[in-house]
Amino acid sequence: MPLPTCFEFECPVKTHCGDRALENIAFEMRAMNAVKPLIIGDEPAAQEKRLVPVLNAFKNAEMTLGVVEAIPVEDPASVAAQLAAIYRDKDCDAIVAVGQGPFIDMAKWLNLMVSTGEENPDAFIEGKGIPRSLRPLAVIPSATADGLELSGYVRLQGKTLRSVNLMPPLLFLDPRSVGQPGDVALAETGLTALTLALEAMFTADANPMDVVYARTAAKLAAMGLNGLAGDSEIGGPLSLTVAHAAALAGCTLGAGPQPLAFKLGWAVAETGKISAAQAMGVMLSYVLEHRLAANEMPADMLLELLDSAGRYARTPEGQRGAAGLQLLRDLLNRLFETTDGKIRRTLSDSGLSLQDVTEATEGISAQGKGNASGGQETIITCAWEGRPIR
Amino acid sequence: MLHIPGYYEYCCRVNVVAGHDGLEKIPALLERVQAAKPMIVTDRGVAGAGLIDVVTAALGDKVTIGGVEDDVPQDSSLEAVQRIAEAYRANGCDALIAVGGGSVLDTAKGANIMVSEETDDLMAFSGVGKLKRRLKPLIAIPTTAGTGSETTLVAVIKDHARHQKMPFVSYFLLPDAAVLDSRMTLTLPPAITAATAMDALTHAVEAYTCLAKNPLSDANAVSAIELIARHLMAVMQQPDNRDGRLALAVAATLAGMAFSNAMVGMVHNIGHATGAVCGVPHGTCMAILLPYGLEYNQHRNGHLTAELLFHLEGPDVFAHTPSDQRAQKVIACIREMNQSLHAITQGQHARCLRETYDRDGNRAVPFERLTEIAATAKNDPAILLNPEDLDDEDYMMVLEHAWDGSPLNRADIAGFEKKY
Amino acid sequence: MELIYSEKRSGKSYLKQSYICVLLWFMGRAVQAASRVDDRVRKEFKDLPENFTFALGVMPAGPHLVVRRTAEGTARYLGHRITPQPVDLKMEFKHLDAGFLTFTFRENTPVATARDRLVVDGEVGYACAVVRILDAVQIYLLPKFIARLAVKRYPRWPLGQKLLHRTRIYWRTILGY
């Protein structure tokens, strides 16, 4: 890939991943001058008792911990306001959030509130006024992530704030805290991560520093999904691999515009017939195929990312792109088989009509990083039918 | 292939701005951190090459420059730090811009601690994690494409009066931004271009092949290796190749990100010692010693070295080389790179320690001093993360070959099994 | 809905802490013993500056082992507290569990360093010597199959010498001289 002649990169996230990652929270807190973290967890985390290892990890840390468990996410603004009151009242000085998806949005918003004193999200629209250093926020995601946990996005009651400064500075991935979701949920997390990562890699202006995160996230996601699809040995527990992929995919996105397949996935999910992750998983290969053809970019590297350098090198140059796309589609087909059809291969598999999909995605613009204009109709039709564009 | 250790940490918080007009982004970067009057810190060499003029021209009238301190010594010293901190306060500055290499950046970091903590006692903040809050904004503009020091959270200041080195380690020492601009390295002489690029290559290769590797530092490393492999020779042949210069600068920063997370091994270990004992420039030591480090460690990490062939030479060479010969091929490629650089620089780029000379034209590393280098290397912490240990005999074996320019004898290395 | 706030002190893991305490105490006295018995360890200490003091331990509040190089060039074990004596080199595990992994020989020093488990502060230049001293002491104290896990490469010292030194170091460690 050619090097862009001008780019900017920033990722304030510090990753801690693997055995006894949680035990480092206290050390990192002390390094940021925090002594009394407010530890918050969402309802699934409470049900699966994922807060227990987090609290235990503070043993011998000589700290006082504030704890609020089983926090609902239905009304994030009022929950965040209540938590902010607790945070101030109890003199907390950092936040540790154990959970996924919208709950992490709420935690980021809570941090913005307690760091700035501002309670109205409108004050921060377009990233304005978000200071560079907020209070320390540690995110402990699960393997049922929606991919935005580590990004600079905060979705709050229909509004979206985004800024690099909203990316959580601390990420802890530990086999004890990622949970053990079922295969379908894991596959969905993996597909979301793969979508964010591959779309970031295959854009005309991808810079080598973004690619570092994207590449790693893509390989991890492919490793996790291949493991779920029943082959290849994978190092370490499957749910950690998938959670790892999703977290790094969020870092890849940062505060940049959401990529096309990701947006289309969320739009199609509005129909209620297919999850966003599955819809983006289906559309990914078609979006990539279309974009690469339109920008005359080779899809060759897909083969290396989804399989290995060896496979890439021994496949003749002219066949690499097609083989890569085929590998992506095969992956979905295999997941379809191992999950008894619960992971869809095409949009029509979900019972949606082509018209449903077209209507659901009407408002989505292809504007954004590296997307070729037009062609959305082709992408959707092919993804619905499950037929390659060419 | 993805190598996932049982546990790893990765952090790279520096905001990197890169481009042919990277410098023009500085006013916006300063505005982002609410600063308006930066002090420029640099050394005589950089200023003499006219690079400060390029920087100030790029800043234009958008920024008031609070002063230019251009006499940072080769080794960052406490006196220079104090002088810069005083000038900063006297001129009412609110940010620092460090233009140059490691010592300039370290000096700027030291001055930043003084002005941010409003202290004259730098020693009180020496050590790991003594800094507890954000410092004044600091922007780093590297002027060689090699050290990657713009990505490190360390500063070392020498107190010559007390014969002490003061180390500082803190995330708050990371620059707020690193600006990579092709204009900063466009006039770098060929021998320095070669040595600094090999320095960056060594960072990347050691980060990938030593013990603290992780999937993100690996991705940094392979990107850096690909960029260097693709652009170094082009830049050597055509020094005003702007795209190539930018690529090498980006590669150096990527390699810096890799090694500041994954650390390094015996190449740096012996290289540091050779520099300390004989004054050989760091990049030169790296270029010479890299193949030896890979050769020595091959029984431990040959499979990792082998993977680098894909990135160094491309898929065709990778596919054509049998898998058990790939590591050897990587080592051969690096030797060939050194050979080509030696030819292009008319012998200025040394291929072995015997070929290094000091300013007066004397041999920089006399053979008799190898024992001294070995003794110094034993106490350099870079060895901790090398996959294999080295005892006195091993150090001498590697140094003698590196002095002479002959490959290591595989039979000697196989002696490990007998010895241990 | 009302959120329920609770507050708790981070607990203590007495078992792990006691284990590390005992082990560090034993190691500290063994370092002192080895500096009087083994030539390699003696030479390492001789090369350190006089009164150089190093500590190995666990954050945030210990335990540690603190050892000083005496004027005679041997080692003196100073106990498990960092204060009151000033320490020139501090090697600390970031948390109790990291220390426990290493002191139960599941992660050796290089792996623990690679995994960012340790913070080294102070006169870093002497860290290598300290690591070599600790490696040698472990080789004397531990049976080969465990010591192999603790060091990067297990040396071939003459068997008779190793056994003799091992016995002497054990006696001196227990009796504390």
Image (spheres, coloured by chain):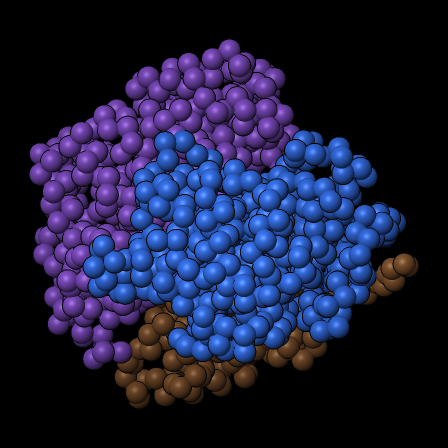
Colour in which chain A is drawn: blue
Viewed as shown, does residue A248 lie left or right of A102? left
Splitting the image into 4 quarters, where does residue A63 fall?
A: bottom right
The mark total stands at 0
**Based on the displayed image, in which of its 4 quarters is residue B42 positioned?**
top left
Residue drawn at x 85%, y 49% as measured from the top left = A78
Residue C30, percent from left and from top = 49, 77
C153 vs B116, left or right, is left
The answer to whether residue A264 of the structure is visible from this angle is: yes
Decide if residue C107 is in sight here: no
Q: Colour of chain C?
A: brown
Viewer-proximal residue among B190 and A44: A44
Q: Residue at x 33, y 28 (%)?
A: B182
Q: Is residue B121 above or below residue C53?
A: above
- Quarter of the picture holding the N terminus of chain B: bottom left
The x and y percentages for residue C138 are 44, 77
Q: Which residue does the image show at 12% across and 59% down from the upper left?
A: B407
Q: Which color has been applied to chain B in this rendered view? A: purple
Q: Is residue A130 shown left or right of residue A120?
A: left
In-front residue for pair B8/A243:
A243
